[in-house]
């Protein structure tokens, strides 16, 4: 039995409610089984950062960074070899094979990204292999341009993790200052997905009980929101590019449909995503970056950046 293709029921439902079912249907071919040769393989070969969405050994969904030297991602046909693993202390350390995973390989310097979804076929001592079901590029929208570099203070140092079940003041400061995060979602039969989100610092509104962000206009596929329509499980990854601090959140999320133009509807779509964290892990990654060049068409904030979720 082959891998299902096309949009699933959650994606179709969100597309219909957003009024973009027709334009989205013309993109369904992007979800066909890929051939990871040619341009896709060359793009992956030169990357120094990927992001992984998967489940830990207790079944919790997390999204984690995978930094590496160019060449650590090697693709051919429908297989991706990843010569890196989540670091010790990362919530996905001890990654288990036999599960569905989602990945995004991103070039922050050129605002390019490639999404990859598939099955974790094998995990070894220094990396893993994904049997790829889908691979397709996303547009450069809302990516803040950065040049990653190794952090001498972090190179070779063990990653110490702090774990909890609630957001503290430090977490809130990091979230409210963020211009970038990565969103992990999942579907009961199609598996996991990792996607990028970006905007003006403050676009994620955070309070002690949870957080929310406005949904911006995109490609009309609604892969992430479609997954949330079918399964509310979600994971967020925030990176403090100045210090290497990483904030991992595992919890649940749902799409709120509001009237377009209400306070906080920065993108004018009448959609926002509300997230409730259940587990929190803070650790570090051995890469940092200087100040970014903001994406030139980030929507301006339409309410106070530190507004708590309603």
Image: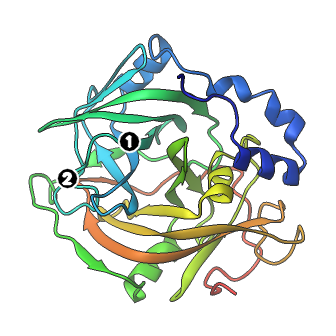
The secondary element bearing badge 1 is classed as strand
Q: Which mark is residue 282?
A: none
Residue pointed to by mark 2: 94
Is there any visible trace of residue 206 in the rendered image? no
Which residue ends up furthest to the front in the rendered image?
1
- Residue 120, percent from left and from top: 34, 37
Q: Are marks 1 and 2 in contact (CB under 8 Å)?
A: no
- Residue 25, percent from left and from top: 81, 31
Which residue ends up furthest to the top in the rendered image?
38
The secondary element bearing badge 2 is classed as loop
Q: Residue at x 44, y 77 (%)?
A: 278
Task: Report which quarter residue 213 is drawn in.
Answer: bottom right
Q: Residue at x 53, y 29 (%)?
A: 134
Please give the count of numbered marks on the rendered protein.
Answer: 2
Q: Which mark is residue 50?
A: 1
Is there any visible trace of residue 283 in the rendered image? yes
- Residue 274, percent from left and from top: 64, 72
- With 175 as the anchor, is 148 left or right in this view? left
Looking at the picture, tell me which residue is in the foreground, 11 or 164: 11
- Looking at marks 1 and 2 on the same chain, the residue that comes earlier in the sequence is marked by 1
**Pointer 2: residues within 10 angstroms few (<14), some, or many (20+)?**
some
Please name which of the two marks, 1 or 2, marks the residue nearer to the observer: 2
Q: Is residue 190 above or below residue 257?
A: above
Q: Residue at x 54, y 70 (%)?
A: 252
**Pointer 1: residues within 10 angstroms few (<14), some, or many (20+)?**
many
- With 83 as the anchor, is 43 left or right in this view? right
């Amino acid at each position: 039995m082959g891998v299902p293709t096309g949009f699933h029921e959650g994606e179709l439902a969100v597309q219909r409610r957003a009024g973009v079912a027709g334009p989205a249907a013309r993109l369904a071919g992007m979800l066909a089984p890929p051939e990871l040769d040619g341009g896709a393989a060359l793009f992956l070969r030169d990357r120094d950062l990927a992001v992984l969405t998967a489940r830990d050994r207790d079944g919790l969904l997390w999204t984690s960074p995978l930094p590496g030297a160019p060449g650590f991602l090697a693709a051919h046909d429908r297989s991706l070899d990843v010569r890196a693993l989540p670091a010790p202390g990362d919530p996905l350390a001890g990654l288990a094979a036999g599960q569905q995973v989602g990945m995004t390989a991103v070039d922050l310097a050129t605002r390019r990204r490639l999404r990859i979804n598939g099955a974790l076929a094998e995990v070894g001592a220094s990396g893993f292999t994904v049997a790829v079901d889908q691979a397709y590029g996303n547009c450069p929208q809302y990516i803040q341009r950065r040049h990653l570099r190794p952090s001498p203070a972090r190179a070779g140092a063990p990653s110490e993790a702090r774990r909890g079940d609630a957001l503290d003041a430090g977490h809130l400061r990091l979230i409210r200052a963020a211009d970038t995060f990565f969103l992990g979602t999942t579907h009961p039969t199609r598996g996991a997905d990792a996607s990028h989100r970006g905007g003006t610092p403050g676009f994620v509104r955070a309070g002690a009980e949870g957080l929310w962000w406005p949904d911006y206009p995109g490609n009309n596929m609604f892969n992430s929101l479609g997954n949330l329509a079918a399964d509310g499980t979600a994971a967020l990854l925030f990176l403090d590019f100045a210090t290497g601090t990483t904030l991992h959140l595992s919890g649940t999320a749902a799409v709120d449909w509001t009237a377009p133009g209400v306070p906080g509807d920065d993108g004018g779509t009448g959609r926002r995503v509300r997230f409730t964290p259940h587990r929190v892990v803070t650790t570090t990654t051995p890469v940092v970056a200087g100040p970014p060049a903001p994406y030139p068409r980030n929507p301006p904030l339409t309410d106070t950046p530190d507004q708590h979720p309603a």
